[in-house]
Every structure is written in C-alpha cells, then in structure tokens.
Image: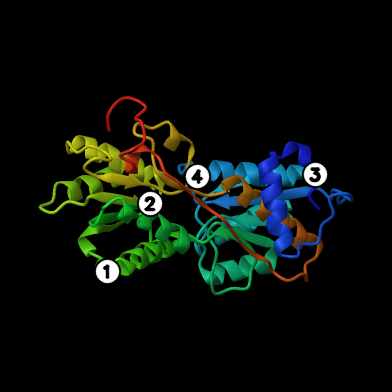
C-alpha cells in the first residue's frame, strides 16, 4: 500500500514499514494500490502548538501518495462544536477523518458512525478504534530517570490539561520514576496548565523558583513549557543546567537551536501522521478490517539544558 516512496524520507518510510510489518499490515511495495481520491479532514485543537506541523506534513504526504487531498481543520471537538464538524464533513463530502484532539467518548462514537476515522497522538482508551501514538508513560519515566541520574531530587512537573491522554500518562511516568527512586510526589511541584502557552508557563515556573524551597529541575510535558522554564530561570538569576535542569517533550524545531539547547523526548511526529493516514485509507477500503492500535518508539535527546558536560554553544540561560 505504501506507494510513491520517493516523496517520503528514507528513514520515515523504513520506520513506518517496519512498524506495519510487525502488525501484520497487508501491503505490497511492488503492487501499489490504485488511488481512489477524495478529501480527508485532519482535526487538531489549534494552530498555536508547533508540534502539530510535522504530524500534518506526514499525513499530507501519505494522502497525496494515494491521490487524496488533506484539509487541516483547527478547533476543539465537543458536543457544542459537533454540529459544525458534521456539517463540514457533509459539505465537503469528506471520505475520512484524522483526529489529534481529545474528544469526549460519546462524541467520538457519533463521529465514527458517520465517517471512517483514525485517532493520532490522542486516543480514547475505552473504545475499539484505530490509533497511532506513543507510550507516554514509558517516555516520561525515562526522562525523569535521566534527571534523577543528574542528581536532581526536587523535580517540578509542568503539564497540560488533565483531559488529554498525554498529560495523564506523562504524569504517571513522572510519578512512577519518583516512586522507584523513593522520592515522594510533592503537590507544590506540580502545575497543570489549561493550555500550551508560553506566558502561562513562565508565570508558574517563576512562582516555584522564587519559593522558599525551589525545584532543582523542571520536567515539562511540552517543549514550549521547557522554553518558558529556561526563561524563568534566567529571570530568577539561576543558571541552566548548573542550578536548575530543564527537560521538555516533543523535540520541536527550536529545541536544538535554543540557548541552552533543550533536552527532550523526540516523538516521531511525521511518522505518526503518515501512519495515521495509511491506517485511515485501509479503513476506508476495508471497513471490516480489525482496528489497529500502534505505539511508535520515542528517543531521549540529551542536550545542554540537563548536561554539565556538553560544550555550550555560547550565551547564557
């Protein structure tokens, strides 16, 4: 099914093919499927989070390789917005839907009854629907273990809204790593922010850094929050990583060029979008096929914000 491989980066193609083979996904590289055409809608909560751009690009590549168009539609999906989305699906005659949103279970059931859909990144753990995501618990635990290995013991956690699967699972990973190290979870070191916004994260990080017993590290559920924590440390007169370490999540573009560069968990963003679209096209062509649930591997990227041994690129925190 994965035709037109020339428009996909080699490492992306190979990783997707390897994952599909492990799942027993039926495809042939020698006999590409005839393109059917049609419109696929990809829904994400907003434009603001830079994480989504690579996911969208991967999905667009897969759609184009099969002769489909992809429309990006940014807004939250809930009971209040469902009529608008259903009207859009009908007006555009969309043949499928990829969702990156947290969606209430009853709304997700309704959407699935109207159009073939695949969940990407966020997924409902209680429904038998296809999805592509990562193991957030495992990845978060790995990051906190890295901070612990650097001598940190008061590790703050800046996280997104609890309605999101990623936020709940990354908290579980954080909690699990601390428990294994015999360190209690301290409520004063945990902040759940209502959305992924730099300004909100700076305010929260500043408040913790100026407390009587400040954190010696920040683990954040988003690289946007990590950048905010580094800025807050600078404003509070604390050096990163010498006095406070900072780690993010996602590996969005600016993490490697920030000063200091940011330690993060690299998600296979393009691959997730690519595979989500491939699973959707399979669902469209074979509606009764079993729903596949795919978790892709992540990678811990260690950079200057948590390492005292890496050469600095210049400047301060």
Secondary structure found at label 3: loop
- Mark 4 or 2: in front is 4
Q: Residues within 10 Å of mark 1 (few under 14, many from 20)?
A: few
Secondary structure found at label 2: loop
- Mark 4 or 1: in front is 1
Report the front residue among 42 and 23: 23
Left or right: 19 in relation to 209:
right
Q: Residue at x 76, y 62 (%)?
A: 25
Q: Which residue is mark 2?
A: 195
Secondary structure found at label 1: loop
Instruction: Return the x and y of residue 278 as percentages of the image width and height.
Output: 72, 54
Q: Residue at x 64, y 69 (%)?
A: 129
Q: Earlier in the sequence, mark 2 or mark 1?
A: 1
- Mark 3 or 4: in front is 4
Q: Is residue 260 above or below residue 119?
A: above
Report the front residue among 242 and 221: 242
Instruction: Return the x and y of residue 118 as percentages of the image width and height.
Output: 65, 60
State how far apart marks 2 and 1 are (Cα): 31 Å
Instruction: Return the x and y of residue 186 as percentages of the image width and height.
Output: 22, 64
State how far apart marks 3 and 4 are (Cα): 26 Å
Q: Residues within 10 Å of mark 4 (few under 14, many from 20)?
A: some
Cβ–Cβ below 8 Å for labels 4 and 2? no
Q: Which residue is mark 4?
A: 51
Q: Earlier in the sequence, mark 4 or mark 1?
A: 4
State how far apart marks 2 and 3 are (Cα): 35 Å
Q: Which residue is mark 3?
A: 67
Quarter placement of the C terminus: top left
């Amino acid at each position: 099914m994965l035709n037109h491989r020339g428009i996909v980066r080699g490492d992306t193609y190979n990783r997707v093919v390897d994952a599909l083979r492990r799942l027993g996904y039926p495809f042939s590289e020698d006999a590409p499927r005839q393109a059917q055409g049609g419109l696929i809608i990809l829904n994400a909560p907003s434009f603001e989070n830079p994480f989504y751009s690579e996911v969208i690009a991967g999905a667009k590549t897969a759609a184009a390789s099969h002769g489909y168009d992809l429309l990006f539609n940014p807004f939250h999906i809930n009971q209040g917005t469902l009529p608008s989305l259903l009207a859009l699906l009908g007006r555009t005659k969309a043949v499928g839907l990829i969702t990156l949103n947290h969606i209430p279970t009853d709304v997700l059931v309704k959407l699935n009854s109207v159009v073939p859909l695949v969940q990407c990144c966020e997924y409902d753990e209680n429904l038998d629907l296809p999805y592509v995501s990562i193991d957030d618990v495992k990845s978060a635990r790995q990051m906190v273990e890295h901070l612990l290995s650097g001598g940190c013991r008061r590790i703050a956690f800046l996280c997104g809204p609890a309605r999101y699967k990623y936020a709940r699972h990354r908290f579980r990973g954080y909690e699990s790593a601390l428990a294994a190290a015999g360190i209690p979870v301290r409520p004063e070191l945990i902040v759940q922010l209502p959305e992924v916004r730099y300004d909100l994260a700076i305010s929260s990080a500043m408040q913790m850094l100026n407390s009587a017993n400040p954190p010696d590290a920040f683990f954040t559920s988003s690289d946007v929050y990590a950048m905010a924590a580094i800025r807050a440390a600078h404003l509070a007169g604390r050096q990163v990583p010498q006095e406070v370490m900072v780690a993010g999540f996602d590996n969005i573009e600016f993490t490697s060029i920030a000063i200091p560069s940011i330690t993060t968990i690299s998600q296979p963003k393009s691959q997730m979008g690519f595979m989500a679209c491939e699973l959707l096209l399979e669902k469209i062509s074979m509606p009764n096929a079993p729903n596949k649930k795919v978790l892709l591997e992540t990678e811990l990227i260690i950079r200057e914000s948590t390492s005292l041994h890496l050469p600095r690129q210049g400047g301060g925190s």
